[in-house]
Each structure stands twice: as C-alpha cells, then as structure tokens.
Image: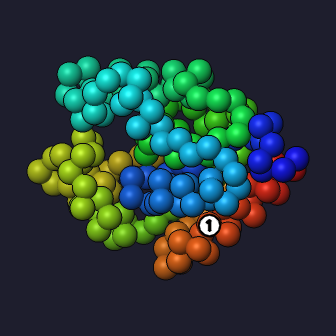
Amino acid sequence: MSANDDKSKNLYLVGFMGVGKSLIGRRVAKELGLRFIDSDVAIERAVGCPISEIFEKEGEARFREYERAFVETGHPKTGCLVACGGGLVVESGMGALLRERGVVISLFASIETILERTGRNNKRPLLNVPDRDSRVRELLNEREPAYLAAGTAISVEGRSSSDVMEHVTRIYRAHSA
C-alpha cells in the first residue's frame, strides 16, 4: 500500500505541548502524501472559536468531549496525519481509539526544551497560570504514562527535524505495511 493511496492508515502524532507535533507532522505528511490535520485547529473550526475561549467559556471537560468527537467522527478514517493536542491521548480510552484508527507515535522532549518552546506561545490555556514551570512539570508528570502507552516513542531532544522526520516516516511505514 503506497502512502498516496486513499486507504493509507492514519498517522497520529501525540505528545506534550511544544514537542514539535505540528512542525514534524506537516513535513512528514508532505513526504508521505497524507493530508495534514491539526486536531486543535479542526476543533476550533468546528466549534467556531479559539481553544482558549472554549476553555474559558465551556471548561476543559467540554473541550475533551470535542477532542473525542474529533477522533471518532471529525476526520477521515484513512490518508491523514493528525497532530493531536497535548491532552488528547490522556483521556481514558483515547490511546486505544487512536491505535484502532492508525499508527500512533509519541514525541518526547526534555522539560527544559518544553519550557523554552511553550514559553513563546500564550495561546495555551493550561499554561496561563502564575507558575508556568511548575504547571508544565505537573502536567508532564501526569501525562507521560499515557504518552508512553499510546504508541512508539521518539525523542526529539538534540535531533534535527530531518532526523525526527526520518524516524517517524520509517516507523509509520513499518507499522502500516
């Protein structure tokens, strides 16, 4: 089965905020001939407002419901690379649901890299707190087991985006054959 085939398994990139899911995802999707979808962007379009506003007006629990709906029915069943929001795979059953739909790869980075990368973006509602560093450490500690259980793990630490892309592509091809 070629990557350009409409029946190509979906590829899901999961991991904490700032590990490079969208950057790597766009490039790998192009390389593999898959349609790139950022789950957060898709949810914003479907709901009609930014994620920060969803969190503010409807709460995190409602946002997680939107994520589940996106995974269940909000994107094609084949031919896509989905960069998943940082908390998507953490909710009960979501890792298994992603694995049923395709290949799941978890991207990891050091806490220092995550802090540096997420510090550049104030559109992350879970990090709009007085002590962002402590919040990142707390969330990462809570979420790491779900990331590890979700699929094949790849560290992005100290690696070029090209190197990470090659690893993601190789793992996808091996698991989708």
Image quarter for residue 94?
A: top right
Residue at image point 16% right, 47% down: 129
Along the line of sight, the residue nearer the viewer: 16 or 167: 167
Residue at image point 34% right, 70% down: 112
Along the line of sight, the residue nearer the viewer: 89 or 170: 170
**For this view, does 126 lie left or right of residue 128?**
right
- The colour style of the image is rainbow
Q: Secondary structure at mark 1?
A: helix
**For this view, does 174 lie left or right of residue 149?**
right
Location of residue 32 in the rendering, given as x and y in whole percent from the top left corner: 71, 55
Residue type pointed to by label 1? Met
Residue at image point 70% right, 40% down: 79
Residue at image point 48% right, 37% down: 39
Location of residue 99 in the rendering, given as x and y in whole percent from the top left corner: 70, 38
Which residue does the numbered mark 1 point to in the structure image? 165
Along the line of sight, the residue nearer the viewer: 74 or 4: 4
Location of residue 101 in the rendering, given as x and y in whole percent from the top left corner: 70, 33
Location of residue 6 in the rendering, given as x and y in whole percent from the top left corner: 77, 37
